[in-house]
Each structure stands twice: as structure tokens, then as C-alpha cells.
Amino acid sequence: MSAETIMREDRNNSHPAQAAGIVMVAFIAANLVGLLRQVVINRAFGTSAVLDAYFAAFRVPDLLFHVIAGGALGSAFIPTFTGFLTKDDRPGAWRLASAVVNWVLLGSTLLAALAAWLAPWLTQGFLAPGFAPEQIALTAALMRIMLASTVVFGISGLLMGVHHSQQHFLSPALAPVLYNAGIIAGAVALAPRWGVRGLAFGILLGAGLHLGVQLPVLRGYHGQYRLTLGWQNVAVRAVGRLMLPRALGLAVWQINFWVNTVIASGLPAGSLSALMIAFQIFTFPLAAIAQAIATAMFPTFSAQAARGEIGAMRTSLAASLRGALYLSIPASVGLWFLGRPLIAMLFQNRTFSAQSTEMVAWALSWYALGLVPHSVVEIATRAFYALKDTRTPVTIGVLAMLINVVLSLLLTATFRAYGLLPHGGLALANTIATTLEMVALLWLLRPRLGGLAAGSILKSVARTAAGTATMTLVLRGWIALAPGSVVTLSLVGVTLGGAIFWGTTAVLGSEQAFRLPALIRRQQRKR
């Protein structure tokens, strides 16, 4: 398929495609800054007991953010808010937004205060019972600092939903860039004096920047804020009704991270840090690929569902899945082959030792196998939310969580029994559970949309698989012949692998191979 054919195909989807491109670039920028953040942190603290405390302390604020104003609120708020905009009822939309932001502010403040009060008990009883007493005290102190960010993120998370409903993606996509920049500032300016507490204060700075970047554009919507909780507002109650199952699902899914923290707290020192660092590296391609596509397409899914355009929604979903699979399949293989040299190049120094590199690379290799199912789940769940069905993905998520917990215990023991680093079992458990979740979601989504356009997806995957296989052969040869420098091995390997993959799929006529150049040319013609 030629580039011109791709440009002519389905003009009505050009705006979502451009939005996905904007979000993807911004997500890549955010993850590059996030990667820089990890370089700074890891080179300063290595995989140490102090960093273990930092990651453990982050669990509670992260849970509150996701349950109150993260994916839970967005999945309920965006379809409802978009429904008002679709009907051109802007006063109703802003009455809804005002009530919801007031509820978020009230709920996040109360829960953060309660968690701060219970921080030592939460740490010792639930988060990290395997920690030494001084490590428990440090974890509780760090948690109390971080919890203040929950209130800020609550408001910021709602504003992201407002922007997305207005088809504006740049400001909310830039917010994570500034969030990571704030943490870097804490690591560079505060950590040398205050130690790991400097990182916690960096989170507060980052949260403020996350909110601040979204405020200027908000004024252009001419919305009117009202000091109300909307007790009698049917739409507010609808958001609450849609949000509760998703909030429950996210809370339950956080149990996976809690189980990882509990199990890793009893493993050799640095196991939790290695697991968390590996997962953060893993989320770089996940965010740049699947989360960017899902974020950009969710308002489109919601509008199509609101108008009853199920066929159009099926087409949009299929296109989203083809794009995500085209990028995630080779990225998964690339992480597997080049993960170790990339980690050594980025992090390794006197503090982050060769042993630290091995521990992180070991976990990353098992996480990498789950990049494809994680990517599909990100997009498939958005389709359910657009249909105002939060119960189905939550139910599947709960079942996947239970499988993950059981597998985490079994595989950690199995890895240990065979003399393998046991924290790798936690990563593999996550991959297996997410794969099963992907299969179940697609199976249940298919009848809701009258099919999934599986034929077009499978044809695209076949071309992608051929390109990935060619890339794999080239990478294996490069690794065998490359000089000893991890910098040369990593950078040339990434460039060479990407070029071979794109060239192969372009020759095979993959539409995704031409889509990015087509979008770039379209943008250039508009200038």
C-alpha cells in the first residue's frame, strides 16, 4: 500500500490520527525526561535499601491518585462530559465539571490526611513488613511528604479529562514532562542535602507543575466554575456510578504492586528497586505507544458511542490496535535483546553496580514479554469505557489480579528453587496475568461491536511479525559482532533494528509503515 493511498484512506479519521501523533510525541518527551529522572536517581542511590523505602512509600499516594482522579475518574467523566458537548449543552457540561472537581478536592484531602496519620501502621502492617525498623520509619516519613501531591493531582487529573473532551491534547500531554522535571530538580538540588527526602519534595514540585501547565488553555473554554457538589445533578450521580466499578478495579489492581512490595521486601536488598526500575523502563514504550494511542482515541470512541455509530467505532478500534501492535511487537523484542546494554549505558556507575544492572535486566526481560498484551488492554478497556461499561473490564481486571497474586507467590518460589533471582518471577506473573486479561477483554468486546475487524488486524500483524523476525536476525548478528562498548552496542542496535524493521514492513506494504511519513507530510503542507 502506497503512502498516497494511506493519505486518502478514511479522511474522517485524520484528526484522531494527528491527535495520537501529538500525544505520542509528548509521551515520548515525557518518558525521555522520565528516563533522565531515573538516570539521576539510580546513579545517586543505586538499588539500595533507601531507594526501596522510596518506592514503597510511593504506593499509597499512587493508589489514591489512580482511585480518585486517575484512570477511574477519566473513564467515567470523559464519556459523560463529552455527551453534554455533543448535545451542545455547555452549561450542563460545566455544572458537571464544577461538581466533580469539588468532590475530588474534598475526597482527596480527607483520604490523604487519613493516610498520613496511618503511615507507620500502613508501612509495617501492609506495605513492607519485611523492612527493618529504621526503613519502616523512613518509608512512613516519605509517604507523608508525597501524600500532599494527591490533592494537586486530583484537580490536575480532572482537568486532563476536560482537555481531552475538548480534543486538546498538548497541555495534558506536557504535564508529565514537567512532573518528571520537578522530580529531577528535587534529585539534583535537594537530594544532596536532604537525601532521599529530596526526591519526595521533588514529587510535590512536579505535581504543581503538572497542574500549572494545564491552566492557561482552560480559560479559552469560557467555562463557569460553580461552588456546588451537585447532589441533585443526574449527571454527577452518573459519573459516580460509572466511576465506582473502575475505582474498585484500580484499587484491586494496585494490590498487584502491593503484593510485589510485600514479597520483594523479604528478598535480598535491592530487589524491590530492581523490580520498580525495570517496570519504569518497560513503561517507556508502553506509554509512548499504547497509552498515547488510547488517550487520543478515547474521546473519539466516546463520541462515536454517544451517537450510536458502532460500525465507525469498530473501525477506529481496529485501526488503533493495528497501530499499537505494529509498534509494540518489535519494541518487545528490542527490550529483550538490548535491555541489558541499555541499562548499563544509562545507569551503571560506582553506586549502580554491575550487579544492579543484572538485577534490573533480569526483571525487564520478563516484563518485555508482556508489552503486547499490556498495549492491547490499554486500548480495549477504553472501548468499554466509551460504551459506558466499566463493570466488565473491572471484573476481568479483578480476576487477572487474583491470578497475578497466585502466580507471584508460585513463580517467586520456583525461581528461588532453581537458583534464579526470585524477583524475576514477579515480573513474569504480571506478564501472564495481563495476557489472559487481554484475551478475555477482546473476547467480550467482539459481540458488543459486531466484530473486531480481525482480518485486517491479522494481516497487519503478519507483516509486523515478518519485519520483527528480520530485525531479530540482524540484532542477533550485531550483538555477536559488536565491539565491547555498551554505548555503541545500544545506540547502533536500536537504530539498526528500527531501520530494518521499518524497511521490511514498508516493502511488505504495511499501512502503518507509511502512516507516520504521511502524517509528517500532511503537517508540512499545512504550514
Image: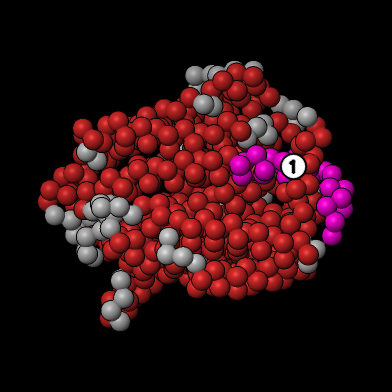
- Quick one: 373 or 486, which is closer to the camera? 486
**What residue do we see at 35% from left, 74% from top?**
411
* Res. 388 in view: no
Magenta stretch prevailing secondary structure: helix
Which contiguous range is marked in magenta?
1-25
Q: Residue at x 85, y 56 (%)?
A: 2
Badge 1 amino acid: Ile
- State the residue lying farthest toward the bottom: 418
Residue 449 is drawn in which quadrant? Answer: bottom right
Q: From what the image shows, is residue 159 above or below residue 430?
A: above
Toward the left, the furthest residue is 133
Q: Is residue 219 left or right of residue 43?
A: right
Mark 1 residue crowding within 10 angstroms, few (<14) / some (14–19) / many (20+): few
Q: Is residue 406 left or right of residue 494?
A: left
Q: Which residue is mark 1?
A: 520
Residue 353, position as x, y percentages in the image: 28, 58
Query: How far across and how far down the image is residue 450, in percent?
Result: 77, 62
Q: Is residue 15 magenta?
A: yes
Indicate whether 233 appears above or below 133: above
